[in-house]
Amino acid sequence: MATVLVFVAVIRRELNYLPDLLVPSDFSFLNQSYDWWEDAALLTLYLTSVGLLIYSRRYLWAVLKNVDVSLYLGVATLAILQYMGENAIVFPHTFGGIVEELAETLIYLIALLYLWKFTLNDFESCLLHKLNDGLSHANH
């Protein structure tokens, strides 16, 4: 659940122009502006995500430990390309914007696909199998 909340928060950050298009500038609810409500909702989302990640830290660490290193390297490479494109390092400014958006899209796509295919039951059975193998080798 925490990973889904983090994914939603990141996508929301990327779609920061939507409120400008959809919410009137004079919006007010309970004497608070849209910006106040948005900040309150995002803070709640962030705190809930962090709390859930802390609560599930053993699972999170076990999952991160079992991810293939090539996935980390690929995402790190895309993050570097995104930074270079955003700051026009090596790439011309106009082409850098395209590189930045493509790299971000690929990172989000990888994250979405990983979340989509990850099932906790499969992970738990795999972890239990590894634990049992470790115990059987320790007893011999």
Image (cartoon, rainbow, N blue to C red):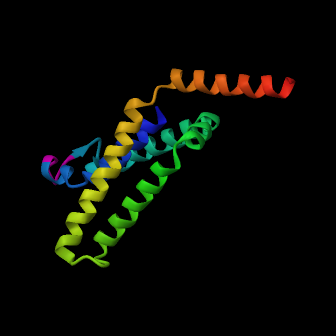
The image quadrant where one finds the C terminus is top right
Q: Is residue 32 left or right of residue 140?
A: left
> In terms of depth relative to the viewer, which is nearer, 11 or 60?
60
Quadrant in the picture for residue 118: top left
Residue at the (49%, 40%) spot, across then down = 49
Q: Is residue 38 visible?
A: no
Residue at the (19%, 71%) spot, across then down = 95
Residue at the far right in the pictured view? 140
Boundaries of the magenta span:
22-27
Residue at the (44%, 42%) spot, across then down = 44
Quadrant in the picture for residue 4: top left
Q: Residue 104 location, x and y as percent? A: 31, 56
Residue 98 on the magenta span: no
Q: Residue 32 location, x and y as percent? A: 30, 48
Residue at the (30%, 51%) spot, across then down = 106
Q: Is residue 99 left or right of residue 72?
A: left
